[in-house]
Image (cartoon, grey):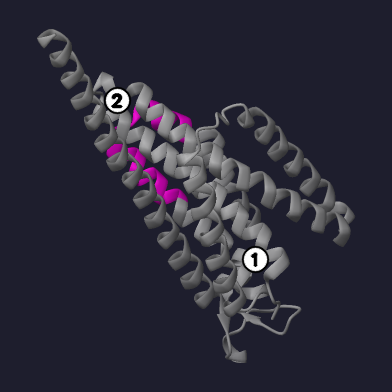
């Protein structure tokens, strides 16, 4: 009986340690993601401020909506460099992130994530040329509320949603193909459908990634590899960051008020 009580006490202590570690792990995930979002917002706002001018003598180009661009703005948004700005974050995700996780220490992975957030900010700065600041802020708040609810559900639900992953990733691939096709078609109806489906897909991915982060920690916590757990936290933060960002952009198509 005494031996049973000892085992039960040890098991309870271990469970409590895992629960405490999981809370710390999730705090690190959300904290890292939040810092990344702040970096993105500041970079986008700063670059947009430097790209637009009200001084005709300092303008290098004129936008169709009456905005005047500085030489920096013309370079970022009108020259061939705009393709580099648009594609650099994708190249980082598909070519650089995996190598960073395998080879760099946890601090290097964290730095890589923040660098990626800054790249996204530069790429995203053009929304300030199209939409009003109020509608951007409004959409960001709505996205934040929706993200919090979806992530909380993914964390607390007892339902196993791991099977959603492959289906949702296939949806993302289909979404990318449809967006590329619509570059040439320029169909408003197709863009509306893409935006609606995109919101649903990344809403699902938010819940899926949250549960995956939790499950991965619980499965590996007993191994005690803190460096690996730190990298897993930054990887989880990146996945949730991308889900949030895409939900925000697709919702902006619906809620954004153009200048």
User: Which residue corresponds to the image point at 46% horizontal and 53% vertical from the top-left?
Assistant: 117
Asked if residue 259 is positioned above or below residue 124 in the image, the reply reads: below
What x and y, as percent, mark residue 57?
A: 59, 90
Read off the residue under disc 2: 221
Q: Quadrant of the N terminus?
A: top left
Q: Residue 190, located in which quarter of the rendered image? A: bottom right
Q: Is residue 187 visible?
A: no
Q: Nearer the viewer, residue 169 or 53?
A: 169
User: Which residue corresponds to the image point at 66% horizontal and 36% vertical from the top-left?
Assistant: 168
Read off the residue under disc 1: 77
Q: Residues within 10 Å of mark 1 (few under 14, many from 20)?
A: some
Span colored in magenta: 97-116
Q: Is residue 150 visible?
A: yes
Q: Which structural element holds mark 2?
A: helix
User: Which residue corresponds to the image point at 58% horizontal and 89% vertical from the top-left?
Assistant: 54
Q: Quadrant of the C terminus?
A: bottom right
* Labels 2, 1: front one: 2
Real-space Cα separation, disc 2 to disc 1, in angstroms: 46 Å
User: Which residue corresponds to the image point at 78% horizontal and 41% vertical from the top-left?
Assistant: 177
Total count of labels: 2
What x and y, as percent, mark residue 226?
A: 25, 29
Asked whether the beta carbons under mark 2 and mark 1 sit within 8 Å of each other, the answer is no
Q: Nearer the viewer, residue 205 or 55?
A: 205
Q: Residue 245, located in which quarter of the rendered image? A: bottom right
Asked if residue 4 is positioned above or below residue 192 in the image, the reply reads: above
Would you say residue 109 sits in the magenta stretch? yes
């Amino acid at each position: 009986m005494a031996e049973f009580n000892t085992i039960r006490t040890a098991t309870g202590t271990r469970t409590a340690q895992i629960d405490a570690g999981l809370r710390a792990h999730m705090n690190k995930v959300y904290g890292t993601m939040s810092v990344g979002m702040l970096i993105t917002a500041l970079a986008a706002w700063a670059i947009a401020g430097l790209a637009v001018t009200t001084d005709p003598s300092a303008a290098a180009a004129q936008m169709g909506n009456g905005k005047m661009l500085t030489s920096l703005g013309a370079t970022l948004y009108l020259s061939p460099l705009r393709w580099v700005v648009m594609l650099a974050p994708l190249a980082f995700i598909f070519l650089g992130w995996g190598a960073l996780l395998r080879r760099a220490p946890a601090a290097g992975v964290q730095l890589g994530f923040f660098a990626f957030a800054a790249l996204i900010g530069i790429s995203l700065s053009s929304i300030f040329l199209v939409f009003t600041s109020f509608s951007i802020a409004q959409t960001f708040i709505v996205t934040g509320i929706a993200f919090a609810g979806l992530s909380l559900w993914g964390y607390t639900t007892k339902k196993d949603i791991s099977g959603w992953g492959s289906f949702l990733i296939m949806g993302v691939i289909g979404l990318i193909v449809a967006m590329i096709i619509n570059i040439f078609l320029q169909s408003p109806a197709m863009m509306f459908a893409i935006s609606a489906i995109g919101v649903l897909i990344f809403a699902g991915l938010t819940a899926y990634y949250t549960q995956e982060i939790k499950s991965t920690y619980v499965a590996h916590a007993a191994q005690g590899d803190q460096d690996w757990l730190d990298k897993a936290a930054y990887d989880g933060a990146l996945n949730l960051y991308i889900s949030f960002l895409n939900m925000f952009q697709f919702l902006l198509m619906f809620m954004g008020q153009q200048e």
